[in-house]
Image (cartoon, grey):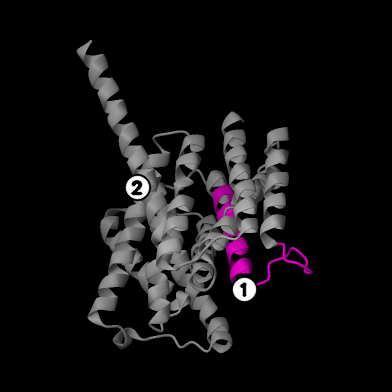
Amino acid sequence: MDLNNKQNKNKQYKNSLAIAGLLFGATAWGIIWYPYRLMSEAGVSGVAASFYTYSIAVIIASLLFAKHWRGLFSLPKSIVLLSLIAGWSNLGYVMAVVHGEVMRVMLLFYLSPLWTLILAHFWLKEPISRAGIFAILLSLIGAFIMLWQPGAWPFPHSTSDWLAISAGLCFALTNVITRKSHYLSLRAKSLAVWIGVVAMAILCLPFVQPIAGEQFPNLSFFSATQWLVMSLIAVLLVAVTLAVQYSVTQMSATRASVIFLFELVVAAIASYYLAHEVMTWNMRLGGGFIIGAALIASFNHASE
């Protein structure tokens, strides 16, 4: 009897820890756009800020996982593809929230369940149920409402819109590749993502600088306070990744997806008070459709 009680308490503890980890991750991703905006206002572009913060994250992770470096060169080449696609997902997201409306960017990013259903069907040969088809239609209707403007086609009208959609698409691709690459450890996948952001930032610099007129700041550009802020962001990125990875291994994907939608609540409150952004009626209505589609897609995946 005592053994059963101990096991139940241990299970409850792990469950509570997993929920706390997801809420921590959702809160962090719902607010992490703000320090990047502050850095942009200080003259550091989203690309440059991502390069430095993720470089620090790679250094921290390399120290934490030092004993695992021996198997680095034995990893399959597919990790390079995962690294670049996941890298653009994170970099595109940062660039979008720096220049676009936070909630608009996040809701367009949350079209990713739509892309995941389609990609998993054609790439992994996973069937799409009626609920999945309904989720796809709901996502498209939500996007149509959000992007609608009087006298214009309901297509993305700004660079931040395109960045958000492309980031969500790459996030879906990352999920599909991760499912296919089950032989990769969580540490390898995490490090691949962080390195991918650094690599994509380097690749984007020649294109971003001439268009935006932005210069890439060198190491001496930053003050001690700015280095501290970037280091704190890097620590947060590592902590969030590890917390979320632990949490998703302790509960069903459906429950994790539902809890992680708390990110949108945090982002809505933060964008209102920190950036004074207010959602329009079509953003609220379209966003409701997209969130509903995300929930349906999550339950559809769990029932397969």
SS label for mark 1:
helix
Q: Position of residue 292 (x, y in %)?
A: 61, 42
Q: Amino acid at mark 2?
A: Ala
C-alpha separation, residue under disc 2 versus residue under disc 1 = 32 Å
- Residue 212: which quarter of the image? bottom right
Residue position for label 2 = 243
Q: Quadrant of residue 30?
A: bottom left
Say which amino acid is labelled 1.
Thr
- Is 162 inside the magenta-drawn segment? yes
302 vs 65: above or below = above
> Residue 262: percent from the left, percent from the top?
45, 47
89 over 286 or under it: above or below: below
Q: Which residue range is magenta in the image? A: 148-176
Q: The N terminus lies in which quarter of the figure? A: top left
Question: Residue at coordinates 43% horizontally, 85% vertically from top-left?
Answer: 216
Q: Earlier in the sequence, mark 2 or mark 1?
A: 1
For the residue pair 147 and 254, the one nearer the viewer reads as: 147
Residue farthest to the top, as pictured: 1
| Left or right of 128, for residue 290 | left
In the figure, is residue 224 to the left or right of 49?
Answer: left
Residue at coordinates 71% horizontally, 39% vertically from top-left? 134
Residue carrying label 1: 159
x and y percentages locating residue 122 in the rendered image? 71, 46
